[in-house]
Image (cartoon, rainbow, N blue to C red):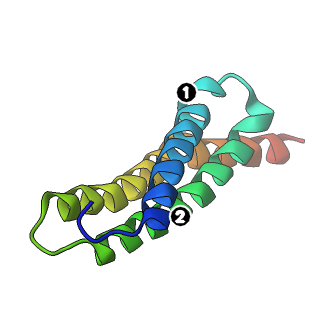
Amino acid sequence: MAGISIAVRALMALSGVVGLTMFILANFYLSRRPGLKLTTALLQIGVNCFVFCSWLNGFVQATPGTLVRLVALVGFIVPCCMVSITVVRVVVPELIRRAKVSNSS
């Protein structure tokens, strides 16, 4: 890849796989387990912060005007979208549910 070091490429690949896996777990797979939903969602948000930073580093190191830089740009925009989806689909409803449960007690 144009100008991106091997260590940054490895971090980009690893973070992308882990970020996508955590997104799928938080939003789809663990949706029926209420005790794990919020924990997994918060872990996914933390992991996607790491994904954002590693892909941003790749974007900064990439040669301007190349396809590699465009891919890195998409790579650090996608985690922001994934975090937004998780907040709307998992975190806010779970916090509302917990607030209703504590108020009814």
**Numbered mark located on residue 49 in the image:** 2
Callout 1 secondary element: helix
Q: Amino acid at mark 1?
A: Phe
Q: How many marks?
A: 2
Locate the C terminus by quadrant.
top right
- For the residue pair 42 and 93, the one nearer the viewer reads as 42
Q: Which residue is mark 1?
A: 28
- For the residue pair 65 and 50, the one nearer the viewer reads as 65
Residue that appears at 21% across and 59% down: 68
Callout 2 secondary element: helix
Residue that appears at 76% across and 36% down: 36
- Label 2 Cα neighbours within 10 Å, binned few <14 / some 14-19 / many ≥20: some
Q: Contact (CB < 8 A) between labels 2 and 1?
A: no
Q: Amino acid at mark 2?
A: Cys
- Label 1 Cα neighbours within 10 Å, binned few <14 / some 14-19 / many ≥20: few
Left or right? Give the position of 73 relative to 38: left
Residue that appears at 80% across and 35% down: 35
Residue that appears at 26% across and 63% down: 73
Q: Eyeballing the image, is 29 above or below 103? A: above
Q: Looking at the rendering, which quadrant does residue 60 occupy?
A: bottom left
Residue 4: x %, y % from top left: 34, 68
Left or right? Give the position of 67 relative to 19: left
